[in-house]
Image (cartoon, grey):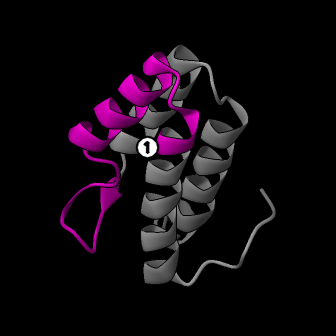
Amino acid sequence: MPRRREGRDLPEIVSKLFEQARAEFPDPWAVNRTLVQLSRLYDPVSGGPLLRHELRRRIVESLERGAVDEARAALEARFEEYRATFRLEERES
């Protein structure tokens, strides 16, 4: 029986979801929907969700206040942390 490829595709899926979240800025509702998808994914390095609830809430609340740069910085910091873990290739944003 062939193995499922999900584990090997995870970095690609995560990268696409981060790109989608970036594209939805500054709409807090659209960004939140994408971040919920990210929070459902398991991060094998930390042993928990890929995007913790506290960070998702902070990003969405920042967008609701109009602090787009603060929200973008938080999202980018988490993506860079994840990218360094899996050594993803740099993608244009």
Q: In this picture, which residue range is highlighted in magenta?
A: 42-70
Q: Does the magenta-highlighted stretch encompass residue 58? A: yes
Residue at (65% x, 30% y) in the render: 25
Q: Looking at the image, which residue sits at the far left? A: 47
Task: Identify residue type, mark 1.
Answer: Leu
Residue 45: x and y in percent read 27, 75
Q: Is residue 16 left or right of residue 38?
A: right
* Residue topped by disc 1: 38
Answer above or below: position of 35 versus 64.
Answer: below
User: Eyeballing the image, is 21 above or below 92?
Assistant: above
Q: What element carries label 1?
A: helix
Look at 81% across and 63% down and name the residue there.
92
Quarter holding the C terminus is bottom right
Q: Return the residue nearer the eye: 83 or 42.
A: 83
Q: In this view, does 88 lie to the left or right of 74?
A: right
Instruction: Examine the rendering and report whether any part of residue 12 can be seen.
Output: yes
Query: Is 67 part of what is drawn in magenta?
Result: yes
34 above or below 41? Answer: above
Picture coordinates of residue 49, whole percent (x, y): 26, 51
Q: Residue furthest right?
A: 92
Which residue is painted at 72% across and 75% down in the image? 90
